[in-house]
């Protein structure tokens, strides 16, 4: 005799509440949805770059390597996942970001804005619950002396 088991419903509760982010939104009656690590990296990188005050991403060595790579004819252009590290589980993700901020920006406020934007973007687009977004400020971009300030002595 074959025994059948009833799968748990993935529909919102009768009370009209929506399921929380990561509350098994990636498992449906039709099967499972798996989000690759590279997908989360790209989404997080794009979301971070959207925040005003983020000049670039990556540590000094990765930015130098990327600058060389971009100059090679036929290269794919800038890498949007540069400076982004992620850990992706079945329902949760953690994001680590290395950024360079513009001089004059409040690092604390900028960090909170980056965390909020990355968390919202990744959760909205993937259905994963983002448990943490760590922001590492590696450098401050100073305005160029040649363009920004006139010479004091003529």
Image (cartoon, rainbow, N blue to C red):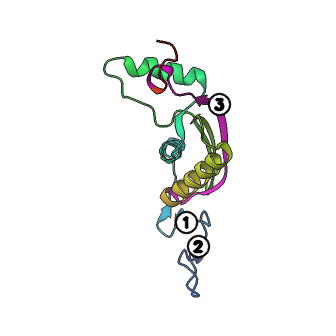
Q: Residue furthest left?
A: 74
Q: Is residue 133 above or below residue 146?
A: below
From the image, tell me which residue sits under label 3. 138
Q: Is residue 100 above or below residue 51?
A: above
Question: Residue 18: where, in percent of width, then height?
Answer: 56, 76
Classify residue 7 by image quadrant.
bottom right
From the image, tell me which residue sits under label 2. 19
Q: Name which residue lies at 64% across and 46% down.
A: 111
Q: Nearer the viewer, residue 118 or 42?
A: 118
**Magenta segment, which residues?**
126-147
Residue 133 in magenta stretch: yes
Q: Is residue 3 above or below residue 48?
A: below
Q: Is residue 129 above or below residue 38?
A: below
**Which numbered mark, 3 or 2, is in the foreground of this view?**
3
Which quadrant of the figure contains the N terminus? bottom right
Q: Residues within 10 Å of mark 3 (few under 14, many from 20)?
A: some
From the image, tell me which residue sits under label 1. 25
Marks 1 and 2, how far apart at CA: 8 Å
């Amino acid at each position: 005799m074959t025994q059948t088991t009833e799968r748990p419903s993935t529909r919102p509760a009768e009370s009209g509440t929506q399921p929380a982010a990561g509350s098994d939104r990636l498992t449906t009656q039709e099967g499972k949805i798996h989000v690759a690590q590279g997908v989360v990296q790209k989404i997080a990188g794009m979301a971070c770059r959207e925040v005003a005050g983020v000049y670039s991403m990556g540590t000094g060595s990765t930015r130098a390597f990327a600058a060389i790579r971009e100059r090679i004819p036929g290269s794919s252009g800038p890498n949007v996942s540069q400076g982004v590290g992620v850990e992706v589980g079945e329902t949760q993700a953690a994001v680590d970001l290395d950024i360079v901020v513009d001089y004059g920006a409040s690092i604390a406020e900028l960090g909170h804005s980056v965390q909020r934007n990355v968390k919202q973007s990744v959760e909205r687009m993937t259905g994963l619950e983002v448990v943490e977004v760590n922001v590492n400020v590696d450098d401050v971009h100073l305005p160029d002396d040649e363009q920004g300030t006139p010479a004091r002595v003529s």
